[in-house]
Image (cartoon, rainbow, N blue to C red):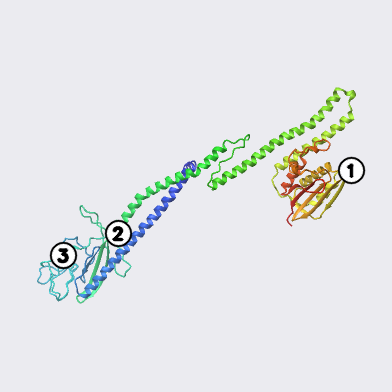
């Protein structure tokens, strides 16, 4: 458990560097082993092809009755007479072969014949066989054969192969000779395994066996060179990858550190700071932009909350002062107090205070309420019920309501929106208040119109601010606290709708639109 915890405690730079280096190391090892294996197999195939080619040339020479082409730079070819023991150990170069005690001495030679000696002697030539000379004697060729000849009869004597490791048979139809190795010469490198191939040739003197051998030293050297290069180059490659990853990650995370440093300076009392946005346009830049947008909304919300608290304190203090002043005067001069007028004024102030606290509570609930779709309801029926429950007034009320206008929403909030619009219209109307509801452009449209003085064009947005009142509404008997229209717009936006003042021939027209409920 400690190792994973310790790894998680490392920085992002360290974890990224370790991960990248580990991945590159695994990939390098896998690719290196694959290349070395391919190189070894390819060189071995080429060596086997050279063996078979030389063996084919030797077969052609034996059949043609000419001297055996026994050696190239890489391949040695020798002939073994019929009946020779091919499993007999091959002597070292320059070493005399051991005599075969099981054979009979050659006539007139004084030397026993060696059935496993690897000498090809043509019958009827009258030439004694020389043990392990590897010389092919062609009948009637006139070439002297024997140890007493003035010159070597063939270069085979110097080209005898060394004992070899077990070898595979090449896929050529030619049988591979398998021999052991492991012999070391004093002062020399170990003898490399041999690749061998053999073929039989039918001659007038009997069946002969041709054996081609080649050392795998060149294959070993190439493989060892590739392995050494991999072992030397891999640490250098990993060091370069680690260094590049470390510094690249540091450069990439530098904007994150700048954002963190700037973020620590923010507080609930000061949200004016903004995150630095790098010019790269990558994920970190988008993160900084998102944080700045969030800070803008938070800053605006905090400023509105502070203004709201200040305005609410002021609005609450005004009715409380209006309640306290007449009561103190009546207490000081009870004989001159108009108790009925004081009572009526106190009740009016309490009603105003009740409406104010109700609006404040509704705003607080809406601010903390999630944007849920609500339930499908008939907005026309709700508007008609709200209009009927209103108290009597001297103003004429007119309604044009289209049936079956369904919207998704909360009945209490929408009823409060209609009530606030009607309250505002009746507060400023002279003779008439109208309410209309219809479907227009795929949305429900609610209009509340009065025939009062209207709202100037420059103040059409100002009236929707909290505690905002026009000069004509400052009088207590006509104006409210300035929360009704602000609350109505909040409710409209909560239902994904809009509320605005639209043009009219006379008075003010408040238009609210809502999306229709799904059928």
Q: Could you say which is closer to the camera, residue 256 or residue 432? A: 432
Q: Could you say which is closer to the camera, residue 71 or residue 174? A: 71
For mark 1, does the 10 Å Cα neighbourhood hold few (<14), some (14 to 19), or many (20 or more) residues? few
Q: Would you say 417 lies left or right of 208 here? A: right
Residue at horizontal 74 percent and vertical 39 percent from the top: 466
Residue at horizontal 84 percent and vertical 27 percent from the top: 327
For mark 3, does the 10 Å Cα neighbourhood hold few (<14), some (14 to 19), or many (20 or more) residues? some
Where is residue 435 drawn, in percent x and y? 82, 49
Q: CA distance from mark 3 to mark 2?
A: 35 Å
Above or below, 138 against 223 in this view is: below
Judging by the rendered image, the residue that carries numbered circle 3 is 99
Judging by the rendered image, the residue that carries numbered circle 2 is 219
Q: Earlier in the sequence, mark 2 or mark 1?
A: 2
Q: Earlier in the sequence, mark 3 or mark 2?
A: 3
Q: CA distance from mark 1 to mark 3?
A: 146 Å
Numbered tag placed on residue 394 in the rendering: 1
Q: Quadrant of residue 519?
A: bottom right
Q: Would you say 188 lies left or right of 482 here? A: left
Q: Quadrant of residue 225?
A: bottom left
Disc 1, SS: loop
Disc 2, SS: helix
Where is residue 116 drawn, in percent x and y? 19, 67
Q: Is residue 4 visible?
A: no
Q: Could you say which is closer to the camera, residue 105 or residue 166? A: 166
């Amino acid at each position: 458990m400690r190792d994973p915890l310790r790894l998680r405690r490392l920085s992002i730079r360290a974890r990224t560097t370790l991960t990248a280096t580990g991945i590159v190391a695994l990939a390098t090892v896998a690719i290196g082993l694959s290349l070395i294996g391919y190189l070894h197999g390819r060189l071995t195939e080429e060596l086997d092809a050279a063996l078979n080619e030389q063996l084919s040339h030797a077969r052609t020479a034996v059949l043609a009755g000419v001297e055996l082409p026994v050696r190239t730079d890489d391949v040695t070819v020798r002939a073994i007479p019929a009946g020779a023991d091919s499993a007999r150990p091959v002597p070292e170069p320059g070493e005399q072969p051991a005599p075969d005690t099981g054979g009979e001495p050659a006539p007139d030679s004084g030397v026993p014949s060696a059935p496993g000696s690897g000498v090809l002697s043509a019958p009827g030539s009258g030439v004694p066989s020389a043990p392990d000379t590897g010389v092919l004697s062609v009948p009637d060729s006139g070439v002297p054969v024997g140890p007493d000849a003035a010159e070597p009869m063939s270069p085979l004597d110097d080209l005898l192969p060394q004992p070899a490791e077990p070898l595979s048979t090449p896929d050529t139809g030619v049988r591979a000779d398998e021999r052991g190795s492991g012999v070391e010469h004093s002062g020399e490198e170990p003898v490399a395994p041999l690749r061998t191939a053999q073929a039989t040739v039918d001659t007038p003197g009997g069946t002969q066996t041709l054996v081609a051998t080649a050392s795998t030293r060149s294959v070993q050297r190439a493989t060892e060179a590739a392995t050494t290069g991999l072992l030397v180059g891999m640490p250098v490659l990993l060091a370069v990858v680690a260094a590049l990853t470390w510094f690249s990650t540091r450069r990439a995370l530098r904007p994150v550190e700048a954002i963190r440093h700037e973020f620590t300076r923010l507080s609930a009392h000061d949200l004016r700071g903004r995150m630095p946005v790098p010019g790269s346009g990558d994920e970190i830049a988008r993160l900084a932009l998102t944080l700045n947008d969030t800070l803008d909304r938070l800053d605006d919300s905090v400023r509105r909350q502070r203004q709201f608290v200040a305005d609410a304190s002021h609005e609450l203090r005004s009715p409380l002062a209006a309640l306290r002043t007449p009561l103190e005067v009546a207490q000081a001069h009870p004989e001159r107090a108009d108790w009925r007028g004081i009572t009526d004024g106190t009740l009016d102030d309490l009603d105003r205070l009740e409406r104010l606290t109700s609006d404040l509570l509704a705003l607080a609930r809406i601010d903390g309420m999630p944007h849920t779709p609500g339930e499908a309801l008939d907005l026309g029926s709700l508007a008609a019920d709200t209009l009927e429950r209103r108290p009597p007034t001297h103003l004429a009320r007119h309604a044009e309501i289209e049936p079956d206008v369904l919207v998704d929403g909360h009945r209490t909030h929408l009823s409060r929106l209609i009530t606030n619009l009607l309250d505002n219209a009746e507060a400023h109307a002279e003779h008439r208040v109208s309410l209309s509801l219809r479907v227009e452009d795929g949305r429900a449209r609610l209009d509340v119109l009065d025939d009062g003085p209207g709202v100037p064009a420059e103040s059409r947005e100002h009236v929707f601010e909290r505690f905002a009142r026009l000069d004509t509404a400052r009088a207590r008997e006509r104006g409210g606290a300035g929360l009704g229209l602000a609350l109505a717009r909040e409710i409209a936006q909560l239902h994904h709708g809009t509320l605005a003042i639209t043009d009219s021939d006379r008075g003010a027209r408040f238009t609210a639109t809502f999306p229709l409920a799904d059928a």
